[in-house]
Amino acid sequence: MKNYDPQMHTAEHILNKTMVRLFGIERAFSSHLERKKSKCDYRFNRALSVGEEKSIEDLVNEQLMRHLPVEEHWLSKENAEKRYNLTRLPEDAEDEIRIVTIGDYDACPCIGAHVQNTAEVGEFVLGSSSFENGVLRIRFKLNRPAVNK
């Protein structure tokens, strides 16, 4: 299992699904997740407006505030390939693929650690975004709940 910060990693899942829903793009092709700040890179065709950044931040926080359960399920690789993009999984992935679901909002293959409920994540803060050579980078951090600081 990847040793990502569970709160940040769960926030990344919700950010990815928010980008898919808002812009019809693929999930991030690259991400760098750290406890203090993180970034995700998306294939995109332009910079985001200030209003779009605010919408992303608001929609991610809306999902976090729903206190969604975060669960894992297992699918055969054959069935997982029919429903999910498996290109980011290691080539030597097992025959059973772990699918992480976040309530009714997101489901995707994943090997990282997560919280048990989005209430544990805190507030998502979109710090900045930039666009260069077809890549949109979104930088973010979390204002974590007091018990998890």
Image (spheres, grey):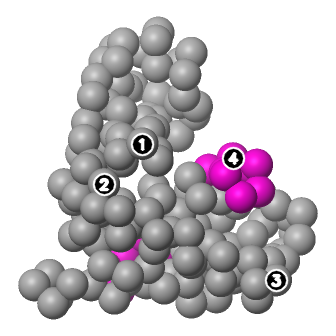
Q: Which residue is mark 4?
A: 26
Q: CA distance from mark 3 to mark 4?
A: 19 Å
Residue found 53% across the figure and 63% down from its top: 15
Identify the amino acid type marked 2: Leu
**Sequence order check, earlier mark of 3 and 2:** 3
- Residue at 34% x, 88% y is 143
Q: Position of residue 72 (x, y in %)?
A: 25, 36
Point out the frontmost of discs 3 and 1: 1
Residue 38 seen from this side: yes
Vertical relation: 38 (above or below) 81: below
Residue 35: x and y, percent?
A: 31, 79
Q: Are marks 3 and 2 in contact (CB under 8 Å)?
A: no
Q: Which residue type carries mark 4? A: Glu
Mark 2, residue position: 68
Q: Earlier in the sequence, mark 3 or mark 1?
A: 3
The answer to whether the residues at label 3 and label 4 have Cβ atoms under 8 Å apart is no
Q: Which residue is mark 3?
A: 49
Q: Are marks 1 and 2 in contact (CB under 8 Å)?
A: yes
Q: Earlier in the sequence, mark 3 or mark 4?
A: 4
Q: Can you give x and y, in whole percent of width and height, for residue 91 in the image?
A: 46, 28
Q: Given the image, on which type of amino acid does mark 1 rest?
A: Asp
Secondary structure beneath dot 2 equals loop
Does residue 4 show up magenta in the picture?
no
Residue beneath disc 1 = 104
Q: In this rendering, which labeled residue sits more in front, label 4 or label 2?
A: 2
Q: Name the image quarter holding residue 42.
A: bottom right
Q: Which residues are magenta?
A: 20-38
The answer to whether residue 84 is above or below residue 1 is above
